[in-house]
Image (cartoon, helix red, strand yellow):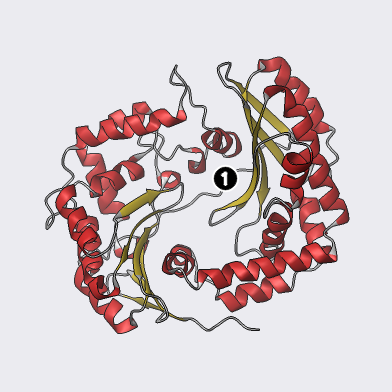
Amino acid sequence: MSLPPLLHTKDTLPNGLRVVTVETPHLHSAILSVYVRSGSRHESSELMGISHFLEHMFFRGSERYRDTVEMNARVEEAGGNLNGITTRDHGYYYTPLHPGQLEVGFEVIGDMLATPRLVQIETERQIILEEMLDEVDETGRDIDIDNLSKAMLFAGNGLAHKIAGTPKTVKRIGLEDLREHHRRMYVGPNLVLACAGPISRSQVLELAERHFGRLPAAGEPPAEALPLPPPPGPTVNLLDHEDSQQTEMRLNFLAPPEHDPDFPALLLARRILDDGLSSRLPFEVVEKRGLAYALHAGIDTYSDLSLFEVEVACAHQKVPTVLATIGDVLGGFASDGPTAAELDRAKRRYRMGLEFALDSASDLAGWFGGTELWRPAETFEERVARVEAVTADDLRRVCTKIFSRSNLHMMLVGRGGGRAEQKLKRQASELPLPK
């Protein structure tokens, strides 16, 4: 049975802004999302966190909406909820909307991105500094395992930068820095507008031209230097955090980007390894042995690479046993591959996930609009065809390459210090993973 066809189109305004429309007449809500190729990857070390800082400042008011209350009230009256997110390689602004109130979202987001007031900077600076406290211990030391993992993997590259920056860089960022970052990044060619819901292409294009046509046309998407590969693994770094009640552990494996021919095999590997409590990793670590409350495996994607990550938190004394269990599962999977039943189940569940996305305007905008920042998105039918073509031999080949000891880079936050780290390094070098 084929997936229902989706009517999606891409147009480009005279200023270079790409406009993606996904027409879904069966839905009863719409979403407007605007994606910008601006994240911590594109920042200097001195101004680390400026993309995130500017994202905050957009909500302080614009030429038409003088403050955050006026701006948010306008969107909320239309059934929406204004949001913004900054990541390492992009940012996005979005709101769900009642289909009959579509122009409100275009009007507000268009105005805030084109003509931000950039007022109350010191107040927003304090809010960001408070937000950053979630990532540090009582001494101000970073204990966020994602920050630490990226710093370990991508040293010397913008992908190692913290999204929010550091207290030092956040205190350094001034009004002129924000204005310059806005001038450089928020230009038509560096943005993608996506709208999904019971809407029409002509309606979306008219609103996009009216409310986003004034964005500058000058400028090009920022360069993204490919990070140098880390030294061959296994790499083990343990940050000693004596006050922690558990050790947080993340196993990182460098993997191919989304457009690579091997990526569909990676998607299926993730589903076989962690797609519910009956899949291999959570069953062995959580359900069978009771070593942890939960375990998560996922894929973190960028334009030029991805990361396969396995993350778990457990009692300090259980770390060697948890690591050994994960190593056994990954090594066995790379060696033997999936069973026929596992491969069939993973493909069916992946396809079901795409079918579920047909009921989500947000998912559709992200699939077709977010991807457009770097390349045209595959249709659902094209992705399903690639996934269906994956064989058990493909999975063995790809997983043998990815889940190798030389490609293992571990970050831990817990107790034990240097002695525990050395023991884990020895253990990692002996895991039953491909060489």
Quick check: 302 left or right of 332?
left
Residue shown at 62% from the left, 70% from the top: 352
Residue shown at 64% from the left, 25% from the top: 238
Quick check: 371 left or right of 350?
left
Determine which residue is flagged by label 1: 227
Quarter assignment of residue 404? top right
Give 224 or 6, whichever is nearer the viewer.
6
Quarter assignment of residue 92? bottom left
Residue 50 position within the rendered picture, expressed as x and y whole percent measured from the top left: 33, 41
Check the image and report above or below for 49 versus 375. above
Residue 364 position within the rendered picture, expressed as x and y whole percent measured from the top left: 46, 69
Give 44 or 306, whichever is nearer the viewer.
306
Q: In this rendering, does residue 121 appear at all?
A: yes
Check the image and report above or below for 27 versus 189. below
Give the total of numbered labels. 1
Residue 190 position within the rendered picture, expressed as x and y whole percent measured from the top left: 36, 61
Check the image and report above or below for 308 versus 176. below
Quadrant of the snapshot with the N terminus? bottom right
Quadrant of the snapshot with the C terminus? top right
The single residue placed furthest to the right in the displayed view is 336
Quick check: 109 left or right of 281?
left
Which amino acid, by three-letter code, is at mark 1? Pro
Residue shown at 88% from the left, 55% from the top: 336
Residue 369 position within the rendered picture, expressed as x and y whole percent measured from the top left: 43, 67
* Badge 1 element: loop
